[in-house]
């Protein structure tokens, strides 16, 4: 059954469950044992009892001919998304023992549809990073080659899917955290339009950029799961999108559609990545797409705008970890200030502290106008540039990351260099949907990702492009 779990499509797994070839309890057991034997460290917590109870429930529903597409399917959830009764740590000492009293809306919806959550996936601490090496619980390795990182911050989710432990996983994306690890591990992922999936229960990093999304084996799985988790939620007023059936109509006609290729975004991309990207473009040309060079001239400032805005929001969001409202406690310090200094000093890792300091710096009285306000103006400019670009093309294609996965042994510099996210973060600043899929491999056998970005709330269009690509010879 292990091979089946690795290779079968979601639909095939579902058919096997319906035909009683095996039960969800059996399937979940296999998934859990794969996760236990996993050498990539993709999980922080495995939730055996709850998963098996959910699987038993799913088996009952299946016996009553339950039509929900996820019924009985083992799934995983990034450890910054709250799961009632299951530890949710954000990969930080700060939340090492935090057991949420409620589940995120996205998780509730997965469970309502019969999805079985086997555990919580590893990540960069508080979702800050591009390598999944900053986790308090140890780094995540890339299942394609364990000498390389899985990418981040949703590295555990991407690794778990790539290793065949579960067919899909929920992640979060603030500046590329779903797409970049998916690209490094050779799986598909969607960062939905801001406002498509409720952020209720997603532990906030940068609220105006954060969005829950899906990592899965294929674009079709991403679509099926997005249909379950998306849609308005009274508990998140920024979630405005009505429910939609993303998996219906994925076979879109590509003939005559225009693909925009932003010349500036290709400037700092590795040769091998570029070669695979252009091969991917040929596949779309064969479908009858037109290709047009467009201009998105924000390369010189988008990373800085992202750093300023995301750090400012992180500094505010992470103020709640004071050992009283939330988080780690110790008994040090005579005064509140001393206690705060001691417990935050002890429980946050280096990268989290760096961002809190940067955030408070740009929000301080003297710097607010020059940094924070200026960054919000430039963010508006990035949105306008995208809007103009979409007058000329239907979707925008670029490599997902400038390189393939970094060696695990590399120093920290690589992972924190702004270059790692330069191709993914503009999409978050503009709030757009973007899907990544695999378009090739480098000479070490590491996957290369291609990103498809669509106008706001045209998530289905991006998924359709990826789906046609995956089934039309694009996926190697
Ligand atoms: N790598 C980016 C950062 O560290 C993106 C993180 C994310 O999307 N959560 O900020």
Image (spheres, rainbow, N blue to C red):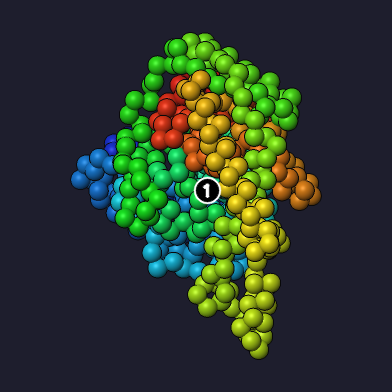
Name the side, left or right, on which 460 lies relative to 259.
left
Name the side, left or right, on which 291 lies relative to 49.
right
Name the side, left or right, on which 289 lies relative to 15.
right
Q: Nearer the viewer, residue 439 or 21?
A: 439
Give me the residue at 64% from left, 72% from top: 344
Instruction: Classify 294 as above or below 152.
Output: above
Label 1 C-beta lies within 8 Å of the nearest ligand 1 atom: yes
Q: Quadrant of the C terminus?
A: top right
Q: How many marks?
A: 1
Q: Nearer the viewer, residue 292 or 109?
A: 292
Give me the residue at 40% from left, 43% from top: 196
Q: Position of residue 272 (x, y in %)?
A: 72, 25
Instruction: Classify 20 as above or below 284.
Output: below
The quadrant holding residue 357 is bottom right
Give me the residue at 52% from left, 72% from top: 326
Q: Nearer the viewer, residue 85 or 255?
A: 255
Name the side, left or right, on which 222 lies relative to 376.
left
Using the rendered image of the protein, determine whether residue 299 is visible from the camera's viewpoint. yes
Q: Quadrant of the N terminus?
A: top left
The quadrant holding residue 468 is top left
Give me the residue at 40% from left, 50% from top: 238
Q: Which residue is mark 1?
A: 209
Using the rendered image of the protein, determine whether residue 163 is visible from the camera's viewpoint. no
Q: Position of residue 209 (x, y in %)?
A: 52, 48
Instruction: Classify 19 as above or below 44.
Output: above
Q: Nearer the viewer, residue 219 or 335?
A: 335
Q: Position of residue 52 (x, y in %)?
A: 38, 56
Instruction: Classify 314 as above or below 417.
Output: below
Judged from the image, the secondary structure of the residue bearing numbered disc 1 is loop
Outermost residue toward the bottom in this view: 334
Q: Residues within 10 Å of mark 1 (few under 14, many from 20)?
A: many
């Amino acid at each position: 059954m292990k091979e089946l779990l690795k290779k079968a499509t979601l639909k095939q797994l579902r058919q096997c469950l319906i035909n009683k070839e095996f039960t969800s309890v059996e399937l979940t057991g296999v998934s859990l044992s794969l996760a236990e034997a996993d050498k990539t460290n993709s999980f922080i917590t495995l939730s055996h009892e709850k998963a098996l109870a959910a699987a038993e429930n799913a088996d009952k529903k299946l016996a009553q001919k339950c039509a929900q597409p996820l019924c009985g399917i083992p799934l995983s959830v990034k450890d910054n998304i709250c799961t009632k009764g299951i530890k949710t740590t954000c990969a930080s000492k700060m939340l090492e023992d935090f057991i949420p009293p409620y589940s995120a809306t996205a998780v509730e919806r997965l469970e309502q549809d019969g999805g079985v959550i086997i555990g919580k996936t590893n990540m960069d601490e508080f979702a800050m990073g591009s390598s999944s090496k900053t986790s308090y619980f140890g780094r995540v390795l890339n299942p394609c080659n364990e000498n390389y990182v899985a990418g981040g911050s949703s590295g555990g989710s991407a690794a778990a899917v790539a290793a065949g432990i579960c067919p899909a996983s929920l992640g979060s994306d603030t500046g590329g955290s779903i797409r970049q690890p998916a690209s490094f591990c050779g799986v598909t992922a969607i960062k939905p339009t801001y406002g498509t999936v409720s952020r209720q229960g997603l532990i906030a990093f940068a609220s105006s950029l954060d969005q829950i999304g899906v990592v899965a084996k294929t674009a079709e799985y991403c679509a099926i799961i997005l249909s379950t988790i998306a849609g308005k939620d009274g508990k998140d007023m920024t979630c405005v999108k009505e429910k939609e059936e993303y998996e219906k109509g994925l076979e879109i006609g590509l003939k005559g559609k225009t693909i925009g290729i932003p010349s500036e975004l290709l400037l700092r991309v590795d040769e091998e990545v570029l070669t695979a990207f252009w091969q991917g473009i040929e596949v779309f040309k064969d479908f009858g797409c037109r290709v047009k060079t467009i201009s998105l001239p924000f390369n010189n400032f988008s990373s800085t705008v992202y750093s300023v805005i995301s750090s400012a929001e992180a500094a505010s969001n992470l103020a709640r970890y004071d050992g009283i409202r939330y988080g780690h406690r110790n008994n040090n310090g005579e005064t509140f200030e001393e206690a705060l200094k001691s417990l935050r000093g002890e429980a946050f890792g280096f990268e989290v502290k760096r961002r809190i300091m940067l955030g408070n710096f740009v929000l301080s009285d003297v710097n607010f106008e020059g940094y924070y306000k200026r960054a919000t103006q430039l963010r508006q400019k990035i949105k306008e540039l995208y809007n103009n670009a979409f007058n000329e093309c239907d979707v925008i294609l670029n490599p997902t990351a400038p390189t393939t996965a970094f060696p695990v042994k590399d120093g920290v510099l690589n992972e924190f260099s702004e270059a790692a996210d330069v191709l993914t973060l503009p999409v978050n600043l503009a709030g757009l949907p973007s899907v990544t899929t695999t378009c090739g491999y480098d000479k070490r056998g590491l996957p290369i990702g291609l990103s498809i970005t669509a106008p706001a709330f045209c998530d289905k269009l991006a998924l359709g492009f990826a789906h046609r690509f995956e089934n039309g010879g694009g996926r190697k």
